[in-house]
Image: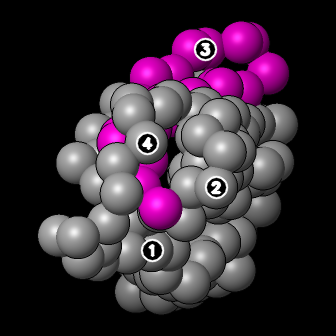
Amino acid sequence: MIPLKPQVAALQFSKLVSSVLAAAVFCFLSSGCSSGPVMIAPKVSSSAQRLGEVEGSGAGMLGLGGTAYYFIPMGLNSRYERAYNEALSKAQGAKALTNVSIEETWFWLGIGTLRQVKITGEAVK
């Protein structure tokens, strides 16, 4: 086996590091997810009829991967909307919520994390 000159070895190492870094950046950029903005509670006039306090919840999961690398969203981006709609459905004739409060919790399930959101507010007509 012929030993490599130091310059050649350094050049090969530099190419290897550049290739690994480029692959890591590509994986990071191509595995992201996004969603559009979500309106939690619209503006409500002060003359709106108050129907009482309601609560709704929604859940989603971020999973499938190693513990620090969960990357597949399952129902994750729509959980706030589902919780808001569930809260609205609990008051007959409700059009919106006011004085909204949001509580989010998560649980580790081994294959992913379950993200739960609870929306509480006063239903108005």
Q: Is residue 82 above or below residue 17?
A: above
**Between 55 and 90, the one nearer to me in the picture:** 90
Region of the chain picked out in magenta, as a range: 104-125
Q: Which residue is mark 3?
A: 108
Residue drawn at point x = 60 percent, y = 77 percent: 35
Residue drawn at point x = 65 percent, y = 35 percent: 90
Q: Is residue 114 above or below residue 37?
A: above
Distance, label 3 to label 1, CA atoms, is 28 Å
Q: Which residue is mark 4?
A: 51
Q: Quadrant of residue 45?
A: bottom left
Checking the image for residue 39, the label placed there is: 1
What amino acid is labelled 2 in the image? Gly
Q: Secondary structure at mark 2?
A: loop
Q: Quadrant of residue 36?
A: bottom right
Q: Nearer the viewer, mark 3 or mark 2?
A: 2
Q: Does residue 10 belong to the magenta stretch?
A: no
